[in-house]
Amino acid sequence: MIPFDLSYHRPDSVEEAVATYRRLERDGRRPLYYGGGTEIITMARLGQVRTGAGVDLKGVPECGIVERRNGSLLLGAGLTLAEVCERGGWAPLADAAGRVADHTSRCKITLGGNLAGQIPYREAVLPLLLVDTVAVVAGEPGLRRERLADVFRATLRLPPGDFLAQLEVPLHEADGPHFAVKRTRLDWVDYPLMTVVGVRAGGRARIAFSGLCGYPFRDAAMERDLNAGRIQDAIGHIPGPVADDLHGSADYRRHVLAGVLQDALEVLRA
Amino acid sequence: MRRDELALDVNGEACRVLARGADTLLEVLRGQLGLTGAKPGCENGDCGACTVIVDGAPIKSCMMLAQEAAGRRVRTVEGLAGTAAQQAFVERFAFQCGYCTSGFLMVAQALCEAHPGADEARMLEWLRSNICRCTGYEEIRAAVRDAVARAKAPAVQGTEPVASASRQG
Ligand SMILES: Cc1cc2nc3c(=O)[nH]c(=O)nc-3n(C[C@H](O)[C@H](O)[C@H](O)COP(=O)(O)OP(=O)(O)OC[C@H]3O[C@@H](n4cnc5c(N)ncnc54)[C@H](O)[C@@H]3O)c2cc1C
Ligand code: FES
């Protein structure tokens, strides 16, 4: 049972969502935007999140969109990961999102929630970091466009009161084969020991990682090494301390990574 | 603590409950409506014992606020009487202690309706959402395989396919 009161709001426009959030904020209710609510509910029950109000984004039409426009794919942040897999139409994203949690949970977890949540893996962001994805952000003046790379650095960084409404993916950038592998300690459904997603763009491999450090990332130095076939050098350039936890030691992760990168390069440079 | 009246559509019946904004659908189904088929297990999204069907999709009711379910069609295992999925579980003896059974049944039913004749890979992917602590997975898979195959088979005169046989109300 969630041990505190929480009011639930379901606005049906961007303007109403932002205004509702701001009103609740002014009233001292510490609101949270609410995607699938899976993280909010499970953490609230454990006392790890405290909020007086959830502003559900699933009634906002812009957040439920799936549309192709001039070679780009526009995806609403309120789509569930199951919808992204079934209707999204971009294989690298379907493969990465399709390994988050389990199928039933993916019927509830949203794309925006996966990127914005506290649980550090955020696996659905990996393919989005490989192309110049645009984040459509909702705030006081309405919708604005930002580079995802500018607003997502390890975690989604938006000013308080703003929310992620859509993601626009330039599909034409990734013009070759793709690679997506999730390794877990034991079970198929688990947090990742590591997830590695790659695409080929303009003849070069682009690769992003989750589970290796405490946040998902794509790193220029690693990519340079990998495109030169220097896997061990790339591993030496991992941009933060390698995770050393119940899922696997840091040494084990580096060992597994070498094999995964070998497989990735075979696919992406073929 | 404040409770508000909430209108829900459960197994085809219009219901009125009094719920806190923070009550999960699982808590309201069990505590207010006496529908104890959905089981609390981990209450953390991991075990699947609390699975119900909401607007055709399997949903872990421990991870949905009751308020979120307003205006949507909720189905629980109590609404699956007479379905091919239920029949297949009985024929295949697909339960041991039975605690996980309703969750597995709901996933099976949702799969039959969304993807009648689903292939083995899709079936396994959907079933990975649920845990059986007695490890009776072989029988459960056999039952779901049967149910999915029956869902695809054309209706014989005088019977209905699984999807419509389960329709409530
Ligand atoms: C059973 C289970 C297994 C999981 N396994 C994995 C896994 O394998 N890999 C993985 O990467 N993750 C995994 N997760 C983590 C999950 O992806 C995150 O917890 C995610 O936040 C849940 O999404 P949601 O839509 O339910 O988020 P919510 O609970 O709705 O929100 C989470 C946070 O994000 C914020 N938020 C939500 N939507 C937006 C938006 N559009 N704009 C701005 N902020 C927003 C909320 O305010 C809140 O702070 C798992 C979670 C569960 C419950
Ligand atoms: S009780 Fe809901 S998933 Fe375990």
Image (spheres, coloured by chain):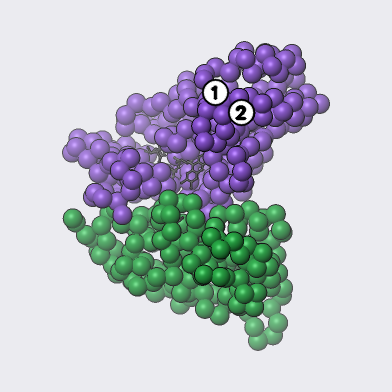
Chain colours: A purple, B green
Residue B144 placement (x, y as % from top left):
64, 67
Query: Based on the displayed image, in which of its 4 quarters is residue A61 positioned?
Result: top left
**Which residue is the site of mark 1?**
A242
Query: Based on the displayed image, in which of its 4 quarters is residue A52 positioned?
Result: top left
Residue at figure coordinates x 54%, y 40% from the top left: A191
- In the orientation shown, which residue stands out farthest toward the bottom? B158
- Figure quadrant, ligand 1: top left
Q: Is residue B87 above or below residue A63?
A: below
Q: Tell me the quadrant of the picture where the N terminus of chain A can be found.
A: bottom left
Residue at figure coordinates x 60%, y 39% from the top left: A185
- On what subunit does the disc labeled 2 rest? A
Residue A130 placement (x, y as % from top left):
61, 25
Q: Is residue B27 left or right of residue A63?
A: left
Residue B88 placement (x, y as % from top left):
63, 75
How many numbered discs sit on the rendered protein?
2
Q: Is residue A147 visible?
A: no
In the rendered structure, which amino acid carries the disc numbered 2? Arg
Residue neighbourhood size for the residue with mark 1, other residues' Cα within 10 Å, grouped as few (<14), some (14–19), many (≥20): some
Residue neighbourhood size for the residue with mark 2, other residues' Cα within 10 Å, grouped as few (<14), some (14–19), many (≥20): some
Residue nearest the viewer, comparing B106 with B93:
B93
Q: CA distance from mark 2 to mark 1?
A: 8 Å
Residue B110 placement (x, y as % from top left):
56, 64
Q: Is residue B121 left or right of residue A30?
A: right
The local secondary structure at tag 2 comes to helix
Q: Is residue A33 above or below residue B136?
A: above
Residue nearest the viewer, comparing B55 with A219:
A219
Query: Based on the displayed image, in which of its 4 quarters is residue B162 positioned?
Result: bottom right
- On what subunit does the disc labeled 1 rest? A
In the rendered structure, which amino acid carries the disc numbered 1? Val
Q: Which mark is residue A253?
A: 2
